[in-house]
Amino acid sequence: MQGQQVAVNAQNQTNTANNSGLPLGQVILKMNDSIPMSSVGLLELAHREYQAGDYENAERHCMQLWRQDQTNTGVLLLLSSIHFQCRRLDKSAQFSTLAIKQNPLLAEAYSNLGNVFKERGQLQEALENYRHAVRLKPDFIDGYINLAAALVAAGDMEQAVQAYITALQYNPDLYCVRSDLGNLLKALGRLDEAKACYLKAIETRPDFAVAWSNLGCVFNAQGEIWLAIHHFEKAVGLDPNFLDAYINLGNVLKEARIFDRAVAAYLRALNLSPNNAVVHGNLACVYYEQGLIDLAIDTYRRAIELQPNFPDAYCNLANALKEKGQVSEAEECYNTALRLCPSHADS
């Protein structure tokens, strides 16, 4: 989801993967030098409160400033951002529109308005506002990033690629954006280009675990199992709480039939996410391959308990039960798998 971005120049890394936890997108102008010092201090305080997620006090201080001067676009944009974060979309749009009324060339206000339209599912209106924003301000990096996200939502992947590329031309060091571009290229099947994006992201930020994991996914898709394992292991080494990387590591180790290490990866994933039905199901498959049938049965049952609509788990449980000679229970599980997913012809 697009969201708030806290500086007009957007030189700092702003992405859903950033340390602040704030999503990307809404723009807040810096203080106007013409505001009296007391007002500048109050607006700075509101910015800090906004950054800290204290939207109630940020709004209170902004409204105090707005009552003093209803023409200040910095205050209007901050208010639009606060309301956006609080899911008050109508008010967010209202303050963006007021900012545009004060300054029709204010690219950041059009971008904020685009975010509201995108959140409402009005993609064409969102695209129009994002495009207008980057026309007004051709070096508006966050405008291009928001435009790219809206283009992806609209299914226009090629134009989204171009929007990301344009953002990176203005700031090649935005490693999260380069990784997002890699994800898009990977989804388009352009694996070598995706790989180049991830490698560049890692070159810029060597401890960026997400890019290491994404690169592992590309190597796995290309059949380079050992390189995939290496990159997933690097990712979890950099971020010991990286759930998806542990799952990916477990999957590729399972595929390579390195079962002991696959079990360890899945168990680590379950430490992070104990109720993840898919991980329980994958772990059960490894136990089955190891000949630990009773343990596999228990683990399949746990997966089904967590996700009753899980045909693969029912089918695999049936196989394990059949192995134990529990034929009637196996048939019942096969029938459940077929009911949930008629394409399970192997049942």
Image (spheres, rainbow, N blue to C red):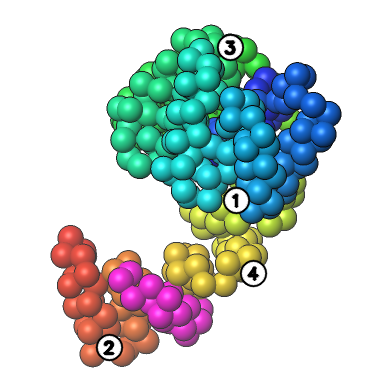
Which callout, 4 or 3, points to the residue nearer the camera? 3
Residue at numbered disc 3 = 139
Which one is earlier in the sequence, the residue at label 1 or at label 4?
1
x, y percent for residue 17: 63, 41
Quarter of the figure that contains the C terminus: bottom left
Horizontal side, residue 335 vs residue 159: left or right = left
Task: Judge whether 97 appears above or below 235 on screen.
Answer: above
Nearest the viewer among 112 and 279 is 112
Nearest the viewer among 134 and 218 is 134
Nearest the viewer among 31 and 115 is 31
Contact check, label 3 and label 2, Cβ < 8 Å: no
Residue at numbered disc 2 = 329
Local secondary structure at mark 1:
helix
Which one is earlier in the sequence, the residue at label 1 or at label 3?
3
Residue at numbered disc 1 = 245
* Residue 273 visible, this angle: yes
Local secondary structure at mark 2:
helix
Which one is earlier in the sequence, the residue at label 2 or at label 4?
4
